[in-house]
Image (spheres, helix red, strand yellow):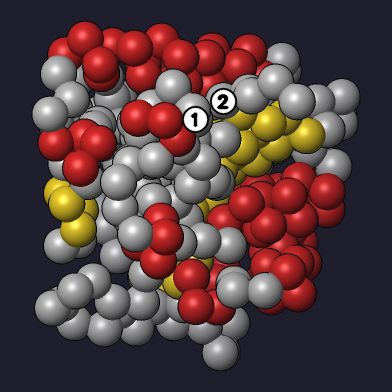
Amino acid sequence: MTYQPFHIVGEDRPSRWLVTCDHAANTVPAPVNGGSLGIAPEDMARHIAFDPGAAGVTLGLAELLDAPAILSNFSRLVIDPNRGEDDPTLLMKLYDGTIVPANRHADAAEKGRRLDAYYRPYHKAQARLAARQDNTVLLSIHSYTPQLNGRPIRPWHVGILHGRDARLAVPLIRRLEAEPDLCVGENEPYGGHLDGDSVDRHAIQHGRANVLIEIRNDLIQTDEQQYAWAKRLAPILEETLAATGL
């Protein structure tokens, strides 16, 4: 089977939602250092290489919302699709205490090759999907580690990120805060959006409604947990979107 830098599921589904997963996979394509970044398998299974559990939640939400989904098929350590092309963290050489040998001496030419082969095709496809309807709502799914090395434990079950466009994010936060068993973070465990990131590029710059959801990855380790979160979030998302009138 020919390698593709992204997967699209349900392209013909009618919903105005578009579900995206920028860090769906820990794949290292063969042209990148023979298919290895030179780090241990246990590191490739960590959050530094992808967002564990996020792909399953994405697929579940896309099914339940009757929406298309696009998922990356290359590790964020190959090149990070959720960064702008001029972002200094686009190609990481050290992440959460792990040196990435295959990136250590990567020069501008190597970065350019990875942009052309993986990053740009992914964003071209996402742009096409986002433009398929005039009222597309971008739903970006991520996961995060419960604790970075040497840092405090993160208490939130789910975080909602927003920057200058909080039209959907803030109502969603308030709705999730009404769930008695959830600890909800606003712009946690990270703050807002970065200029040039996926939500900025495909939603904010076009005036499209959007929301980015971060789920703590120890809560979505199994297929059952991932689908359970999708089942919980889908009706809440629909309810919140309808309430905003966006």
Q: Residue 131 at what x, y percent from top left? A: 64, 14
**Camera sees residue 28:** yes
**Camera sees residue 205:** no
Query: Residue 217 vs residue 20: left or right?
Result: left
Which of the marked residues, 2 or 1, is nearer the chain's N terminus?
Answer: 2
Q: Residues within 10 Å of mark 1 (few under 14, many from 20)?
A: many
Q: Which amino acid type is shown beneath numbered disc 2?
A: Pro
Quickly name the residue at label 1: 29
Q: Is residue 186 above or below residue 136?
A: below
Q: Residue 195 at what x, y percent from top left? A: 25, 28
Residue at x-position 78% and y-position 34% = 9
Residue at x-position 45% and y-position 35% = 35
Do the numbered discs 2 and 1 sit on residues whose CB atoms are within 8 Å? yes
Q: Secondary structure at mark 2?
A: loop
Q: Is residue 176 above or below residue 210?
A: below
Quickly name the residue at label 2: 5
Quadrant of the drawing holding the N terminus: top right
Q: Is residue 53 above or below residue 181?
A: above
Mark number for residue 175?
Answer: none
Q: Which amino acid type is shown beneath numbered disc 1?
A: Pro
Query: Residue 5 vs residue 104: left or right?
Result: right
Kindly report the distance in space between the C-alpha atoms of the residues bearing marks 2 and 1.
9 Å
Camera-nearest residue between 205 and 170: 205
Q: Is residue 181 above or below residue 16?
A: below
Residue at x-position 44% and y-position 51% = 50
Q: Residue 115 falls in which quadrant of the image?
A: top left
Camera-nearest residue between 63 and 23: 23
Q: Secondary structure at mark 1?
A: loop
Camera-nearest residue between 122 and 3: 3
Q: Residue 11 falls in which quadrant of the image?
A: top right
Q: Residue 83 at what x, y percent from top left? A: 30, 32
Q: Residue 163 at what x, y percent from top left? A: 31, 42
